[in-house]
């Protein structure tokens, strides 16, 4: 049996060897033939050469969206199983054998591992990744949608839903896995073992830039999937926060300092609620406070990104995986 590992890439020379080597180790552990397909989006570093030295088929496809890159990878793939991995991920050695065993037991159709950051990541990158870890949740958790940092499925599921959207600049993973769920696939997230995300944000500028880009997916997903409360609730919440900030500034300008302070405090409440939702099971006060601040920033970025996406701002960023 063969698994085709599809990896979109843009300037990932620092990480691509680790990613591909971890996939090869997992394939050997499971006794599978492992086909490596790297879709390069126009890198200017040595990433394509490194991938070729490790035996990957490298396709040079500059200017495509990340969904289009993954679809081209599947077109070149010959495996019964498809693994979509970002170019900065390190997969655990027993990943494939574990997941294929769960599939043989009828536990799921589409699988993803929880991700964590290496310990050398700055605190804000560690906290932001840690919020996705399902502390206290079941070891195997059914999902309605999943991100594509790592996904494993049989090829027929990909074909059944027509692959990834090629028009979405970001959020294509949520769109893809939602459609898989609607088509009857059972999506299953595993808390252990963890995949490691080496492409963590090394600076505040990088974190803010990436999050602004990620938040640009909301309008595109609405256009693709139609109006939905699930899709609308976060951008609408972010616009409410912006509105509260504007009211606070207006109150301050006309001399109502106490009212302005009250409005600012109210505007932090959504971020606090999001923080508590994601941190309570971790039982870590510092983590909760860190998330409070990060969610406050994220809500403001989401409102800005929603407006910028009206002008196709996301079209300016390469697809990197």
Image: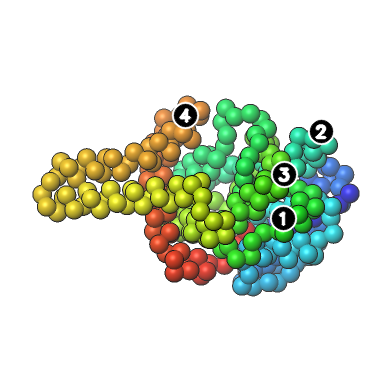
Badge 1 or badge 3: first in the primary sequence:
1
The quadrant the C terminus occupies is: bottom right
Picture disc at residue 184? 3
Residue at image mark 1: 161
**How far from the left and from the top, in percent, is residue 171?**
57, 56
Badge 1 or badge 2: first in the primary sequence:
2
Badge 4 or badge 3: first in the primary sequence:
3
Q: Secondary structure at mark 1?
A: helix
Can residue 310 be seen here? The reply is yes
Q: Secondary structure at mark 4?
A: helix
- Mark 4 or mark 3: which is in front? 3
User: Between marks 3 and 2, how big is the CA–CA gap?
Assistant: 17 Å
Badge 4 or badge 1: first in the primary sequence:
1
User: Between marks 1 and 3, how big is the CA–CA gap?
Assistant: 10 Å
User: Between marks 4 and 2, how big is the CA–CA gap?
Assistant: 33 Å
Is 61 positioned to the left or the right of 259 in the image? right
Q: Quadrant of residue 54?
A: bottom right
User: Between marks 4 and 3, how big is the CA–CA gap?
Assistant: 32 Å
Please, is residue 252 above or below residue 318 in the view?
above
- Mark 4 or mark 1: which is in front? 1
Q: Nearer the viewer, residue 282 or 156?
A: 156
Q: Are marks 4 and 3 in contact (CB under 8 Å)?
A: no
Q: Nearer the viewer, residue 146 or 60?
A: 146
Residue at image mark 4: 280
Residue at image mark 2: 105
- Mark 1 or mark 2: which is in front? 1
User: Between marks 4 and 1, how big is the CA–CA gap?
Assistant: 37 Å
**How far from the left and from the top, in percent, is residue 302?**
42, 54
- Mark 4 or mark 2: which is in front? 2
């Amino acid at each position: 049996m063969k698994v085709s590992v599809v990896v979109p890439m843009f300037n990932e020379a620092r990480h691509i060897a680790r990613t591909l080597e971890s996939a090869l180790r997992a394939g050997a552990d499971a006794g599978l033939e492992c086909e490596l397909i790297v879709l390069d989006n126009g890198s200017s570093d040595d990433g394509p050469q490194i991938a070729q030295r490790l035996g990957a088929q490298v396709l040079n496809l500059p200017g495509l969206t990340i969904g289009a890159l993954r679809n081209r990878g599947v077109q070149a793939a010959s495996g019964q199983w498809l693994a979509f991995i970002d170019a900065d991920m390190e997969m655990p050695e027993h990943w494939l054998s574990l997941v294929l065993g769960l599939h043989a037991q009828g536990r799921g159709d589409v699988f993803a591992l929880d991700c964590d950051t290496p310990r050398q990541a700055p605190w804000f990158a560690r906290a932001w990744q840690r919020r996705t870890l399902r502390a206290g949740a079941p070891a195997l958790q059914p999902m309605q949608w999943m991100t594509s940092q790592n996904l494993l499925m049989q090829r027929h599921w990909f074909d059944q839903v027509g692959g990834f959207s090629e028009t979405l600049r970001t959020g294509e993973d949520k769109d893809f896995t939602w459609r898989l769920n609607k088509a009857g696939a059972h999506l299953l997230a595993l808390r252990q073992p963890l995949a490691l995300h080496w492409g963590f944000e090394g600076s505040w500028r990088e974190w803010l830039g990436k999050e602004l880009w990620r938040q640009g997916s909301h309008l595109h997903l609405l256009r693709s999937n139609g109006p939905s409360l699930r899709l609308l609730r976060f951008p609408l919440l972010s616009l409410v926060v912006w509105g509260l900030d504007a009211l606070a500034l207006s109150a301050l300008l006309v001399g109502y300092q106490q009212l302005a302070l009250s409005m600012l405090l109210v505007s932090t409440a959504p971020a606090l609620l999001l923080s508590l939702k994601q941190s309570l099971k971790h039982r870590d006060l510092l983590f909760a406070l860190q998330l409070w601040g990060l969610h406050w920033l994220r809500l403001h970025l989401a409102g800005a990104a929603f407006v910028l996406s009206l002008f196709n701002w996301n079209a300016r960023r390469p697809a990197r995986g």
